[in-house]
Amino acid sequence: MDVPLWVWGVTVGVIVAMLLVDFLGHVRKAHEPQLREAGLWSAAYVLIALIFGVVVWVTWGSEYGQQYFSGYVLEKSLSVDNLFVFVLILSSFRVPRQYQQKVLLIGIVIALVLRTIFIFVGAAAVNEFAWIFYIFGAFLIWVAIGQLRQDSEQEGEYQENAMLRLVRRLFRTTDDYADDKLFVRQDGLLYVTPMLIVMIAIGSADVLFAVDSIPAIFTVTQETYLVLTANAFALLGLRQLYFLIDGLLDKLVYLHYGLAAILTLIGVKAIIHALHENDLPFLNSGEPIEVVPEIPTNVSLLAVLSILIVTTVASLTIGRRRKGKPKPVKPPRALGN
């Protein structure tokens, strides 16, 4: 896939422009988004992502178009996993509702910058070592098993990671929020407010989720441009998605089964791809192993969409009809916490 430098520049410019619209149009004036606002802007971000996919399809061909859409749907589905942890973090830090937009957006920007670094490092590794897909596949299947083994009868609690503990140790922190300020002066001394702490928490939690989502999308496409744009468009709409489905998160009781199935599918796809590449000399004399055909991109895309639809419908129908009082659902476990 040949992507001219000016196309990279335009793409980065569009992403930055979308962030500026969020900062200047929504976050600068603190308020609690209503359902209609969150719904319209969520639809707008999805529409922009779909239009971009059509541009990729028309410009570079159907194969790359399918790869982009597969990567975007995969990242979008895994981003719902992030929202569970966002709920835990925001409630744990007792962030006032009108300031949650700013917290989420800054956290997403942090995650976007760090994920970009991960993507370029991952792209270099994938291009140099095809056998890394064995590791990707095994890791994704291991994460899928973790999703299945989670205890749905215990309510999750957010625990601060090492980064946050270090920030608290190095800087003076206030007990209360000072509007949406990150720093305040008290008695001539500079203090960090909980607002900065929770932004770091959101950003670092999302980066931890990249540990499984980045290998997953590299299994779908090895094109750095598509990996980066699919991640960017999935993350950029995450703030609006949070406020749109905030009240539905505790009703998606079967979501972890769906995510486990998706991660298993992508993990198997990665291992099959590694077998076809097979650059390990000690395995079958280094010759490609093509006993099992690779899973086509359009098949994996349809499978991911089907799994999401089935688990969502099942959660909102069968899950609601379960007898007795619904048990609290433990959000999917954030890696590293």
Image (cartoon, rainbow, N blue to C red):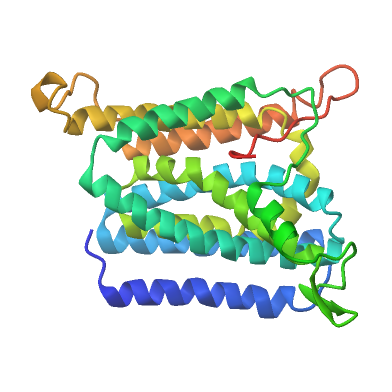
Q: Looking at this view, is 260 or 63 the one in front?
A: 260
Residue at 45% from the left image edge and 55% from the top image edge: 230
Give above or below for 31 relative to 94: below
Residue 213: horizontal and vertical position, in percent?
48, 43
Quadrant location of the N terminus?
A: bottom left
Q: Looking at this view, is 49 or 151 the one in front?
A: 151
Q: Is residue 185 left or right of residue 104?
A: right
Is residue 191 visible from the viewing direction of this image? yes
Q: Residue furthest bottom?
A: 188
Is residue 37 visible from the viewing direction of this image? no
Residue 221: horizontal and vertical position, in percent?
33, 46
Residue 234: horizontal and vertical position, in percent?
54, 55
Give above or below for 187 relative to 91: below
Residue at 58% from the left image edge and 72% from the top image edge: 19
Q: Looking at this view, is 223 or 60 the one in front?
A: 223
Give above or below for 102 relative to 133: below
Quadrant location of the C terminus?
A: top right
Residue 201: horizontal and vertical position, in percent?
68, 54
Residue at 31% from the left image edge and 35% from the top image edge: 133
Residue at 35% from the left image edge and 54% from the top image edge: 121
